[in-house]
Image (tube, coloured by chain):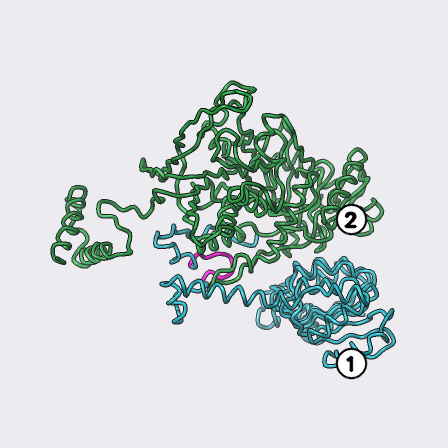
Chain colours: A green, B cyan
Amino acid sequence: MFRRVLRTGLGQSLLIRGLGTRSGNSSLGWDGNVSEIKKKIRSLMPGEPHNFLYDTKHLPPEHSDVVIVGGGVVGLSVAYWLKKLEKRRDAIRVLVVERDQTYSRASTGLSVGGIRQQFSVPQNVQLSLFSIDFLRNINEHLAVVDAPPLDLQFNPSGYLLLASEEGAAILESNVKMQRQEGAKICLMSPEQLQKKFPWINTEGVALASYGLENEGWFDPWSLLQGLRRKVQSMGVFLCQGEVTRFVTSSNRMRTSSGEEVNLRRIYEVHVKMDNSLEYQPVECAIVINAAGAWSGQVAELAGIGKGPPGTLQGTKLPVEPRKRYVYMWHCPQGPGLETPLVTDTNGVYFRREGLGNNYVGGRSPTEEEEPDPADLEVDHDFFQNKVWPHLAQRVPAFEGLKVRSAWAGYYDYNTFDQNGVVGPHPLLVNMYFATGFSGHGLQHALGVGRAVAEMLLNGHFQTIDLSPFLFSRFYLEEKVLEQNII
Amino acid sequence: MAAPRAFPRLVPPKWNGGRRGFRDLSGVVTPEGNQRKRRTLLQFLSDHFYDVEFLREYLLRKQMQKVHLENGSYVRVQDTHGPDIAGAYFILRHGGAVKFRDKEWVRSDGWKRFIAEVSKFQAVPVEAIDASGCAINYHGLGNLLSLKELQSLSLQRCPHVDDWCLSRLYPLGGSLQELSLAGCPRITERGLACLHHLPNLRRLDISDLPAVDFPGLTQILVEEMLPNCEVVGTDWAQGLRQGPEQQPQHTAGPAPAQPLARESRRPLWSV
């Protein structure tokens, strides 16, 4: 019997190899052939991946309960919370599909890494508070047996938001709301500001808000790696591939008022491998769109927005990639160790990086100056003309700075109201969104992950109520404007 | 960014549960990590059996919860006797010592006597706390933050005090004059940056912090940040190259500094 199995297994494999590599078969040599044979025998044993005809190790599984499109910090956070909150061990099979395993264009790795509670929408403040709590105890949450503890390199230096005369009233009301939610923010007059940070030029500043605790910046790459490690240990499948097609089924239903509605469900996701035409159809129950800057494209692929404009079918997901530049410079006489992440009245921001008087900063361009998001090339003239003059005006020591390096990254910019989209789509019932955070995705990722997992498993938000962030607000034209976008 | 921009090898996991290989991700702490050099029997078993793996995860979680349980807030004591007594009781239970104003030090072995004589300490503020070596963490520190007259705090060699704890110390800024962080294994220069919330600090001890990569430079930056404070730490000359005779090609610039460093160990600007 064993001999027959050997012959069948070897025969099939040799046949397949013979067809393709008839001439190159002898290049392996005796040792190579022996190890190939051993591999084939091992693959026949129970428990090993069973692939006679062709190698499928790189392909995602054929069935998966949840498919998460996008393996950045938001996607991995959703995967983590799904596995954490599932009722029984291994109850849900989660697959995370990430197109670029080097994360070269992902917003997570290119982010400046700040976390703050100084937002104008209460839900954003709650999300940040949740995230910072998680980050503080990250070595308990993301502990993996036998793995070294994570070092997030968190700088608890706080954020300093400066406001001019026009913005002072809004800043004050925002701080009042943030304090009610539990953030520790203090307001400072220009005199107090000058006393505390002597390197600042307080001209034009009417009021400043300073985060005393739970604000600062950290290393997003280490968070990403920690999440990947933990999520793999919990049994999530991470696969490299690009989602190219959603296969949906339709269901015509009637609302209570007699209107006909076409509810669709995605039942298959086609994941295409890199540099190849090979794809795997993954049968799924839920799809989560956490594709960051490319969420709009993924939504279009799923057929969201294909309909007459002004209707719910015709409402697109208004998330598009916006390019943002970050510059790193050196200034020997610059602000000292206590420097928070300073945000000026006109949107220029900077923070310290390390001990060597290096600083990282930039500015969000206005609508007219928006650069083309086709690639991640840096425009150095933008720094010369639009960033440096304001930096030098606010911090006189920055007149003598020297730019060391620069990079660009994408914001998954929500053109509607610059706030995230979380929750299911009303018509495509099993697609959930976790995107559109317009520059504060990293700091909200953990809270949003939990919210999406709760919505999926329980049907409603539990810890933080993110119902203002549902997709339906785009159709109902209810803007939840976030004013403190950096 | 501290993590280098070169991306580590990310290997897609095998489908046999995906457990093998994920620990080999180079991550951000040590590239070598826990490779297969010395696998104990338990580690081998947990690679192959779900039950053993679950048990090990459970034990790890229990270990982490232990520190948490001991660091609760003493709300009931606070309500009955006030925040000073609650904070003092917390420190005494954890093995530290407390000094009330105009009284002697109360050591941790005398905590029962403290409970018995608690009426003597009513309305007397706590002046100094010596929490050396105590297992206090971020939550436990919350018991100390309402001590508005605390002048001296010693957190020497506390194994769980880290940067997050330092960021929580700002409510003590009105009165705290002396702070000692010597020997804490988790404090880095990032946590030291939030000490500028303590404007009345006159003496700060930051010697022997193993997680600080550049002690000399850190000391200089902290001294610049806190101009009125005497910072006791490592010698600022530590890290400078020793001896002009070993490197004769140095210019006149750095050379004068080195003989000074070798002659006297005192920092130049201590008062």
| Stretch of the chain drawn in magenta | B24-32
Quarter of the image that includes the C terminus of chain B: bottom right
Q: Mark 2, chain letter?
A: A
Magenta stretch encompasses residue A484: no
> Dot 1 lies on which element?
helix
What residue would you read off at disc 2? A186
What main secondary structure does the magenta stretch of the protein show? loop
Image coords of residue B169 (percent x, y):
74, 61
Q: In this orientation, which residue lies closer to the viewer: B249 or A478? A: A478
Residue type at tag 2: Cys
Image coords of residue A295 (percent x, y):
50, 34
Give a yes or no on whether discs 1 and 2 share a subunit: no
What residue would you read off at disc 1? B113
Q: In this orientation, which residue lies closer to the viewer: A105 or B103? A: B103
Magenta stretch encompasses residue B25: yes
How far apart marks 1 and 2 lie (CA) works out to 41 Å
Q: How many marks?
A: 2
